[in-house]
Amino acid sequence: MDNFIFDNATKIYFGKDQIKALPSLLQIFGKNVLLVYGGGSIKRSGLYDSIHSLLHDFNVVECANVEPNPHHTTVQRGADLCKEHDVDVILAVGGGSVIDAAKVMGAGAHYDGHIWDLVMDASKIKEVVPLVTVLTLSGTGSEMNRGSVITNTDLNIKKGTGGQNSLPYASIIDPTYMMTLPAIQTAAGAIDAFSHALENYFKADNDTFMQDAISEAVMKAMIKYAPIALKEPHNYNARANLAWASTLALNGLTGVGKPGPWAVHAIEHELSAYHDVTHGLGLGILIPVWLGFILEEELMPIFVRYGVNVWGIDPKQDDSSIAYQAIDKTIEFFKSLNAPLTLGEVNIDSTHFEAMAKSAVKLGRLTQHLFPLDENDVMMILNQCL
């Protein structure tokens, strides 16, 4: 296990009716609030009205219509609103895309240049506007980490960033807010959280028992509770377990002490940059193909642990059989969520594969992965996903 510093001070208010804590959380920073949200779902659910009722003593400015893959122009709009209205605190209400956008808006409020500078060079993120979040879609874990992923629609680049001060001050996670989600969003969120644990699981084999055990628990939680949530959308326990496991998947616990970049996310970011596909669905298409591509003898111990500990495959079988069964079970799981399994199902062809592969290797540092990938490798993976 490599040396690490674990620092995560986000306060989590988990459970029913925790929204009542919102005024006391925001007033710590001041009365001028930027409310950031996506489409109309929070209005249809009544959450929008509840928040405005709670914040009757605050000056609320709105930044609505944040995209599922947040655009740099939207983030710039939010940063400009922060400056114009002297915003004291940002309230992000939504899923990971809304929270990601809000983090960079808060950094842009204290930056004189263009917002994209902060994405391309995270070291430029210094002071930020404090952030409080209300989660309505579990999956990304953005409610308890420093990261953001922003898309530049002019350059067809989707890239992650994040500063030391980008961590949310507090996040409210009420599983009841997720009960009215469309089934495909529940599926995409579950695959996203599953992928976070999986990518950290396959980053290095350097005796990180605790990190890997947490990753296994996250993946098993998705396997157990995602089908229940799809069948019984108002099942509180299913929603609660999905939400908490998703938060733990990417709050730092599963990745500390395990060096190296992620491969699948880097490739999926290219799919989203060019085609605006839902992130979790893109990951679900790529993961089984990537697992098959990297299945070699040196990684067999990880595959065997994955098969035995996550999928319950009989350990008495030979290693190769366990590994292939684990990949098959991964595919079966995604299929059970009614998620697409090929790029053709989400209307993506090979037109931009060469540019995607080049960008993924460069921005994702894929040559430094535990199983290094070059541009030809990424091209092969993408073509196998068609």
Image (cartoon, rainbow, N blue to C red):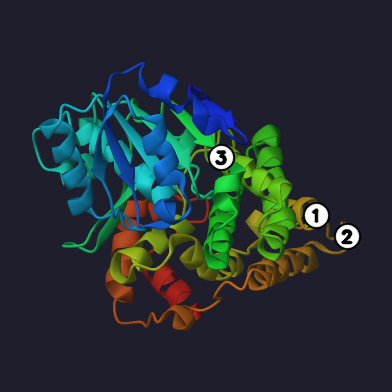
Q: Residue 379 placed where, x, y %? A: 40, 74
Q: Which residue is drawn at 59% across and 50% down?
A: 202
59 or 138: which is nearer to us? 59
Do we see residue 321 in this rendering? yes
Q: Residue 140 placed where, x, y %? A: 49, 48
Which of the 4 image quarters holds residue 76? top left
Name the secondary structure under disc 3: helix
Q: Residue 205 placed where, x, y %? A: 63, 43
Q: Are marks 2 and 1 in contact (CB under 8 Å)?
A: yes
Q: Which residue is drawn at 47% across and 67% down?
A: 282
Residue 188 relative to residue 89: left or right:
right
Residue type highlighted by circle 2: Asp
Residue type highlighted by circle 1: Val
Residue 314: give its label: 2
Q: Give the Cα distance between marks 2 and 3.
A: 30 Å
Q: Residue at x 42, y 51 (%)?
A: 42
Which of the 4 image quarters holds residue 331? bottom right
Q: Give neighbour class at mark 3: few <14, some 14-19, many 20+ (Cα, 10 Å).
A: many
Location of the N terminus (image quadrant): top right
Residue that mark 1 sits on? 308
The number of callouts visible is 3
Name the secondary structure under disc 1: helix
Q: Give the Cα distance between marks 2 and 1.
A: 6 Å
Q: Which residue is drawn at 78% across and 58% down?
A: 311
Name the secondary structure under disc 2: loop
Residue that mark 3 sits on? 247
Q: Nearer the viewer, mark 2 or mark 3?
A: 3
- Residue that extends furthest to the top in the rendered view of this protein: 28
Relative to residue 212, is residue 65 depicted above or below?
below
